Amino acid sequence: MGDATLLLFDAGGVLVDWRGTSGLVELTDGRLDHEQARRFWMGFEAVVPFETGDDDGSRFARAALEALELDMTPTAFLEVFDGWMQGPYPGARELVESIRPAYRRAVLSNTNPVHWPRLIDDYHFGAPFERAFASHEIGARKPDADAFEIVCEALGVAPRQVHFFDDNPECIEAARELGMAATRVQGLDELHRALAELGVLSPSSTQRGSR
């Protein structure tokens, strides 16, 4: 693990079942494939104010409908969008809690005022973490350096003391450029294997194998 003492996790696609990519493929009747849908969320300009606290979702919905050429109301779109967040993967909390006490645990998520309250209030997602940083609350989103720097300052760590886990290559690259260790994982099984290989899990959890 080198100097890393803080394990920093993305939420959607790593610990949380967020089906926005496959949902977008379905909503566009396959006009976007999975990689195009992933890139849409990463590069869509209207998602920035939505995920950094300057939009309650209304502007985002209207812009998405126009960009994707969808024939539905903004309210209907937001209802579909909300349904793509399915909550933590089964076993996610147990996996995080099985990390050895020597390591601090935190979350840095690109999220919004539609999904985050339900994730925190209904699923109690933040419980096993020292701190959960939501982009719309801190006013910065990955892969921008500001998002990572806010976490480091708030938790009193240097980038070299952080090991970051995310499913988007752009975010992994940005973390590494700042001096963090970073591992790309997609889903809980890959995360479990990565944590086991790094030796940060308790022995009983390592022996349990992938979930």
Image: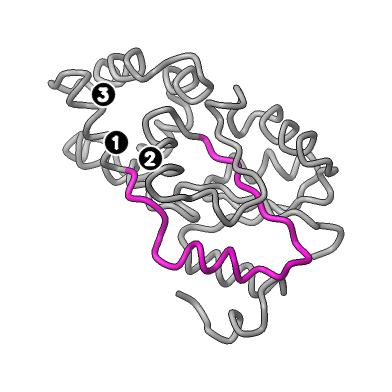
Residue of label 2:
118
| Tag shown at residue 198 | none
Mark 1 or 3, nearer chain start: 3
**Residue type at mark 2?**
Arg
Mark 2 or 3, nearer chain start: 3
Residue of label 1:
82
Residue at screen point 60% across, 22% down: 139
Residue 40: in magenta span: no
* In this view, 130 is above or below 145: below
Magenta residue span: 85-110
Residue 98: in magenta span: yes
**Element type at marker 3?**
helix
Mark 1 in CB contact with mark 2 (< 8 angstroms): yes
Which of these two is toward me, 184 or 72? 72
**Residue type at mark 3?**
Leu
Label 2 and label 3: CA atoms lie apart by 26 Å
